[in-house]
Amino acid sequence: MKVAIYGAGSLGTVLGAYLARSGEQVDLINRNVAHVNALKEKGATITGTVSFNVKVNALSVDEMTDKYDIIFLMTKQLDNKNVVKKLQNYLTDDGVICTMQNGLPEQAVADVIGENRTYGCAIGWGAQLTQPGVSELTSSPDALVFALGALTKEGQEKPHFNQIIRLLSIMGKVECEPNFIGVRWSKLVVNSAFSGLSTVCGTDFGGVSDNKKSRRLAQKIIKEIIDCTAKGGIKIEPIQGKDVVKLLNYNGDFKKKLSFMIIPIAIKKHRKIRASMLQDIEKGKPCEVDAINGVVSEYGDKVGIDTPVNDKTVEIIKRIEKGELKPSFDNLKYYEGLFN
C-alpha cells in the first residue's frame, strides 16, 4: 500500500522518521517549503528523548501527484472538510484517511469520504519543530502510544486497518479502541487542560503543573470535561492504563486535594511538551483552540453543563492570537474568581 503523512510537521516528522528508519516507504508532505527542503537535503533529524537521523521522502503540497491507499492526516484542524475534499483527488478508489488531529475530527472527514474509509487515532506523545528538518521528541520513549479506532465494523474489516496498526506499531504501542469517542475525550482532557494553559501561560506542561494557580485551573478544566461527558453519557477511556475519572474527579474537599496532588505525577512523562497551539502562535499562525477547549465549551452548552474555565481559556487564546496579549503567567489574572 502507498502511504503518506499529510501535514508532516513536528509529530508527522517523528512518525515518518521512525517508519523510514524501519525501511517503510512513506511520503512526508508539508506546506512549509523550508521544512520540506531541509528534509530532502539532510533527512529527518529527531532529537530530544531519542536521537537519530534518517533519509526520508519529502514533498511539498504542490509536488503531490500520486494516489495513496493510506493518508495519515496531521494538519491543524482548522478547515477539515475543504482539506479532505482536496485529498480525495490523491486517494485510490478504496483509499482511507486516518486522522491524527486533536479534538473530535472524525465526523468532518467522514462527511466527505464516508465512515467506512475514516479512521481516528489519538496520539499520546508530543514533539516540536526546532528548525526546518529537525523535530524534538518531548515525551519519554516508553510513552509512545497510539489509540486507534474505526468508525464502522466494515472499516475495521478492511485490510487498511491492519496495515495502519502494523505501521504505527513500528514506533509505539497501538491500542485498538472499541469506544473510540471515549478515547478522543480522554485526549481532550489532556489537551484542554495542559495545551490550553501551556498556550495561555507560555510554558510547557511541566510549567503548568508546577505553578499552583495554573494547576488549579487545569484541575477545573478536567472537572468540567468529566461533568460534561457524564451528563452526555460518554465514558472517558483510561489514559495509558490510568482511569483519569477515578483519579482526578472530585465532589468533596478531600478528593479535590488528592486530585490536585496527583496531577504532577500524571503528566510526569510529558513535562517537556510545549503545546502545538503555543508553537503556532509563536510562528504567527492561527491555532486550533476552537477544536480543543472550544469543543468542550460547545458540548457543555449542548448538555447543559457550565464550562467557565474552558470558556475563559478560549477567550484569552483568541486575544493572544490577535496580538492583544502575549503568552504569559500574567494572563492568569483574567481567571479571577475561577480558582475556587
Image (spheres, helix red, strand yellow):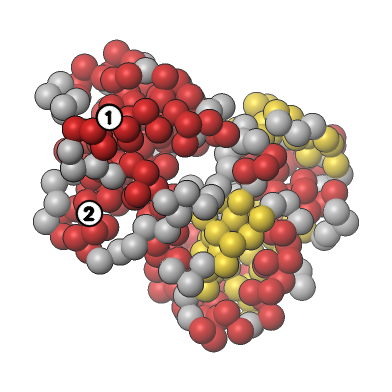
Question: Image quadrant for the N terminus?
Answer: bottom right
Q: Left or right: where does residue 252 sit relative to residue 108? A: left
Residue 291 seen in this snapshot: no
Residue 318 picture location, percent across and down: 29, 33
Mark 2 is on which residue type?
Answer: Cys
Between 262 and 280, the one lying in front of the other is 262
Image quadrant of residue 339?
A: top left
Outermost residue toward the top?
Answer: 330
How dense is the environment of label 2, judged by Cα within 10 Å: few (below 14), some, or many (20 and up)? many
Question: Image quadrant for the C terminus?
Answer: top left
Q: Residue at x 55, y 59 (%)?
A: 147
Residue 82 picture location, percent across and down: 45, 62
Marks 1/2: CA–CA distance:
21 Å
Image quadrant of residue 70?
A: bottom right
Q: Which residue is mark 1?
A: 257
Residue 220 picture location, percent across and down: 25, 36
Name which of mark 1 and mark 2 comes first in the sequence.
Answer: 2
Q: Which type of secondary structure does the marked residue at label 1 adopt?
A: helix
Q: Left or right: where does residue 112 sit relative to residue 200? A: right
Which callout, 1 or 2, points to the residue nearer the camera?
Answer: 1
Residue 229 seen in this snapshot: yes
Q: Residue at x 40, y 64 (%)?
A: 181
Residue 30 picture location, percent across and down: 64, 47
Q: Residue at x 62, y 43 (%)?
A: 143
Which label number is shown at residue 228? Answer: 2
Q: Which type of secondary structure does the marked residue at label 2 adopt?
A: helix
Mark 1 is on which residue type?
Answer: Lys
How dense is the environment of label 1, judged by Cα within 10 Å: few (below 14), some, or many (20 and up)? few
Between 98 and 157, the one lying in front of the other is 157
Between 24 and 210, the one lying in front of the other is 210
**Disc 1 to disc 2: CB gap under 8 Å:** no
Q: Residue at x 33, y 35 (%)?
A: 259
